[in-house]
Image (cartoon, rainbow, N blue to C red):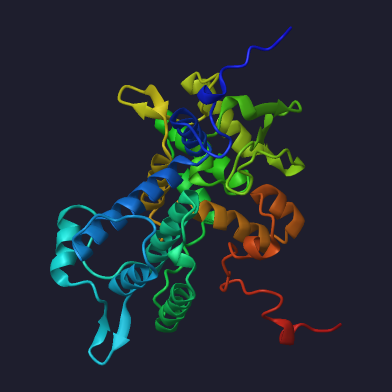
Amino acid sequence: MQLSIPPIESLPQPYELSDVTQRAVNDLLREGEAQNTQASYRSALRYWAAWHAIRYGQPIQLPVPAACVLQFIVDHADRTTDKGLTHELPLEMDQALVKAGYKGKLGAMAHNTLVHRVAVLSKAHRIREVKNPCQDPKVRELLSRTRKAYVKRGALPQKKDAITRDPLQAMLETCDESLRGKRDRALLLFAWSTGGRRRSEVAQADMQFLKRIGNKGDFVYTLAHSKSNQAGVHRPENDKPLLGTAARALATWLEAAKITEGRLFRRVRKGEQVGETLSAGAVRDIVKMRCALAGMEGDFSAHSLRSGFVSEATRQRIPLAETMAMTSHRSVASVLGYARSNLENGSQAGRLFEIDDK
């Protein structure tokens, strides 16, 4: 069969993209990126546009010069002077940005927020394939020195407290036999027992990846996509066992909510009605609410379940390889970064001088 080839002048050129192709490329890039990531990128770019307009009186255009990025950094990073901490963003501009909703409060940004805003601008330049001012040596050096300055002042954020086994038990005791109580008990045990799942992974957990094993009512959950495996590469450690108490709690919730397909965890509306899928933010709110109900003192978040699992595994002398298989960490340094010290119980290393060599 002979192919019918359109006239050459109507064909797209290999060195340029048509509007339709560019839209398709953008759609695939957007679909392959986590929703939380998309939202944070949009927020950062909106802020850059607003700051540039109010700082320079003109719309932002890529590429921006390196001097603009340097100005952005000193506008938003605190530095020590004879008069105390200060930054260069004029108060009236700061007030305008807050009033318009681009900033949450007056003053310098948190260091992590500043670094994220610069990283987003850098990515925007890479995607547009234009000269990237964020790679300028002066910008890179200023960012490096700024972090060191924050470290010296002790101004970098502290890690959230860990939810280890005992705090988790206290949270579970706040879960009654209502439909919402059954859901929260199942959610907390699922997130903790499968290796400390991130809130987005809990929100996206789906029945198609859940399978019963053995004859004791246990499950295995296949984590097909995660932050450390965004390409969905098949690995043995993708399969997370959900056993014993955690498995029974999940089975009880699924049966009570009559969930047989789709997302595992849903909203519970008035009248014990099961609603739509929980968002990642809702997972965070559930963790915080149960911490408050349990009367727990400390700074907790949904990520506390992840650090709590690692901390408890460390305390219980679980082999590091087994812990990493559950958390899906690919590096020893990364997984150890989640472990919180347990000073009240001490450690063998901390008591090394006191150990009798006999």
The image shows residue 10, relative to residue 188, as above or below, that is above
Q: Quadrant of residue 335?
A: bottom right
Q: Position of residue 354 (x, y in %)?
A: 72, 85
Tell me what residue is drawn at x 58 percent, y 62 percent. 338
Residue 298 is at least partly visible in this image: no
Quadrant (top left, top right, bottom left, bottom right) of the C terminus: bottom right
Residue 131 shows up from this direction: yes
Is 56 placed left or right of 110 in the picture?
left
Query: Quadrant of the rendered structure where residue 50 is?
Result: bottom left
Specify the farthest residue to the right. 358
From this view, report whether residue 187 is shown above or below residue 89.
above
Q: Percent position (x, y) of residue 5? A: 62, 16
Q: Residue furthest left?
A: 92
On screen, residue 142 versus residue 264, left or right, reads left
Nearest the viewer among 295 and 78 is 78
Q: Residue 274: image x %, image y %? A: 40, 23
Image coordinates for residue 332, horizontal then vertical, percent: 70, 63
On screen, residue 2 versus residue 14, left or right, reads: right
**Whether residue 28 is situated above or below residue 82 in the rendered picture:** above
Residue at far bottom of view: 82
Q: Nearer the viewer, residue 49 or 82?
A: 49
Quadrant the N terminus occupies: top right
The number of callouts visible is: 0
Residue in front for this viewpoint, 72 or 64 = 64
- Which residue is at 76% across, 56% downward? 321
* Front residue of this view, candidates 335 and 104: 104
For residue 248, what is the image quadrant?
A: top right
Please name the residue shown 69% across and 81% down the image: 351
